[in-house]
Image (cartoon, rainbow, N blue to C red):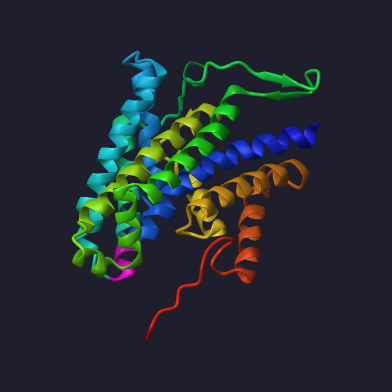
Amino acid sequence: MIFLSNLVNGISLGSIYAIIALGYTMVYGIAKMLNFAHGDVIMVGAYIAFCALQYWNLPPVLALIVAMLVCTALGITIEGLAYRPLRQAASLAVLITAIGMSYLLQNLALLIWGPNPKSFPATTMMALPTFSLFGGKLNISGVTLVAILANIVIMLVLTTFISRTKVGKAMRCVSEDRGAAELMGINVNRTISTTFAIGSALAAVAGILLCSAYPTLMPTTGSMPGIKAFTAAVFGGIGSIPGAMIGGILLGVIEILGKAYISTELGDAIVFAVLIIVLLFRPTGLLGKPIREKV
């Protein structure tokens, strides 16, 4: 029963990683750039939700909506100011800019909210009962269920959006061939901005779920989860939405089981070691497809 409890906790944590990984995989799949400031957008979303709950006394649903709106605006602003001017630049310049934007957001958070940890009102945000199964031997918290259900719903909605809507089809066209998409009348800049907006809104959801499960909130809150979610995106095949989900869940399960049965100190090392082993045999990830380029 302990194993089953750890497995459920791993799926819950992996679901949060999967939601974060969607932001990485969408931006890379469509804009072909790595947004390493994505983890700090998670932190901003968590802080906005914290302020909405603690200081503005908003209901949890409104706090979630406000956090998503702020993060959406932040994602569009980051794309327009930091990444759009570098659309034709070398990938190294984009990477350095992303790291710089990450440090900028962290230091702005230090100036606004200070360096001291804050206790996220998890019980207020997720006032859900704990479910007991097998005569009380297995307890599943409300936060765990919400994280798993949110991951499933977001994945289904996003997959439907990408495959069925006009904007989603435009995203796929830009991902396939940006030049041809422009010739067909697709506004590439607006499409990429929409991608950043969606990814940033999901980052706000992930930030709230993360702080509801682990209530300590700091300016560096999103750094390690962001790195692990990027690892999950690479694990599943970066650019693949189903791959982000599978990679996130597997990563969460490996992390929890590794800490429970091998070593709590080596839990993170085990995660990255598994990633290296997978990439040795499948360099494109579990669901990634090799891309042939003409030279």
Q: Residue 21 at what x, y percent from top left?
A: 47, 49
197 or 208: nearer the eye?
A: 197
User: In the rendered image, is residue 156 in sight?
Assistant: yes
x and y percentages locating residue 285 in the rendered image: 56, 63
Q: How many marks?
A: 0
Q: Residue at x 37, y 86 (%)?
A: 295
Quarter of image, res 239:
bottom left
- Does the magenta stretch mainly form a helix, a strand or a loop? helix
Q: Quadrant of residue 283?
A: bottom right
Farthest residue to the bottom: give it.
295
Task: Relative to 122, say whether 239 is above or below.
Answer: below
Which residue sits at x=46%, y=37%? 206
Give the quadrant of the N terminus. top right
The vertical placement of 245 against 61, above or below, is: below
Question: Which residue is at the front of the view, 229 or 108?
Answer: 229
Instruction: Report the magenta residues as a range.
Output: 90-94
Image location (x, y in percent) of residue 150: 51, 33
